[in-house]
Amino acid sequence: MDLHSGLPYWIIRNSLWDYFHPLEKDLSTDVVIVGSGITGALMAHELCHAGIKCCIVDKRSIATGSSAASTALLQYEIDVPLCRMAKIIGEENAATAYHACLQSISDIKRVLEETGVNAGFEQLPSLFYASSAADNKLLEQEHEIRQKHKLPVNLLEKKKIREEYKVKTPGNALINEASAQMDAYRAATGLLAYHIKESGLKVFTHTSIKECIETSDGCIMTTDRGHKIKCGYVIIATGFEAGQFLPQKNHGSDLYLCTRIASGSFRTPVADTLPDLGNSRSVSIHPHKPIKTGSS
């Protein structure tokens, strides 16, 4: 078996949707979504559902960026632990962010059910464990603040983890039963196929945005082929590549950011300024029997 195909796992598993549809003329719309991965697909779903005119632009084929190499995990945990985020933006704001992430898992399940897209969505518990015994105190702090704000979580000692799940960990762990997994590539392609057919959504692949200029009533974007897209708003949904759309100090860049942009998916810079959560690790659990969680 050749394990070196050169393509991301989810494309190999599902086969590539080779959708070639570059923008070939000027266009006017209400909202432009840059990126056709799972974030862009979910944004398009919400806009189409609300009756807002929109289109998607992607420099590649559909969903062949971050979504094609996804870990497939859906967890409400954010890069910055709740106990540390509370010190940065305030406890209530941090808790609100965590609850929004928790709600998003149910929302994704609902969207897939509404559209009939089979993305292999499956509810599974997950462990978030410390990489050493020295980090157990931090896990206890995290457990305490999550319980305070009624987030689903239990604290397990490493002995209990070994007994219940046959997983050997160097430290204790937090477990929550609200996690899930899904095939993000199949979800994105399925949602876009649904709205191309049902909502008349326009998806322009192999179309790169080279310039975005703010106007009095929105933005004008210029593609690599010189075509213009006039819109009211731009949503950046390019995953880990979103950084290229952030303001540049050096205006020698060939891409200029318009200020009327709502970012759909990028990691907050604050995560890069914080110490790690004890180098904690997260895993999904596939139980052979109903999961039993220990109480704290």
Image (tube, rainbow, N blue to C red):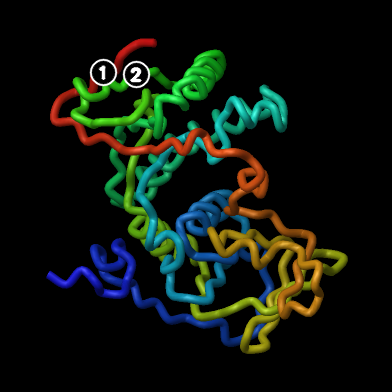
Q: How many marks?
A: 2
- Return the residue found at the far right: 216
Q: Secondary structure at mark 1?
A: helix
Q: CA distance from mark 2 to mark 1?
A: 6 Å
Quadrant where the N terminus is found in the figure: bottom left
Q: Residues within 10 Å of mark 1 (few under 14, many from 20)?
A: some
Q: In front here: 206 or 288?
A: 288
| Residue 156 - label | 2
Q: Quadrant of residue 270?
A: top right
* Residue 106 x, y percent position in the rendering: 43, 35
Residue at (87%, 66%) from the top-left corner?
216
Q: Residue at x 83, y 64 (%)?
A: 217
Give the secondary structure at mark 2: strand
- The amino acid beneath tag 1 is Lys
Residue 190 position (above or below residue 75): below
Residue at left offset 43%, top offset 42%: 108
Locate residue 38, reporting x and y percent. Answer: 46, 56
* Residue occupying image coordinates x 56% and y 82%: 23
Task: Name, please, the residue furthest toward the top.
Answer: 296
- Marks 1 and 2: in contact by CB < 8 Å? yes
Quarter of the image for residue 16 reads bottom left
- Where residue 21 appears, as percent x and y from the top left, is 47, 81
Q: Quadrant of the C terminus?
A: top left
| Amino acid, disc 2 | Leu
Q: Which mark is on residue 17?
A: none
Q: Which residue is mark 1?
A: 160
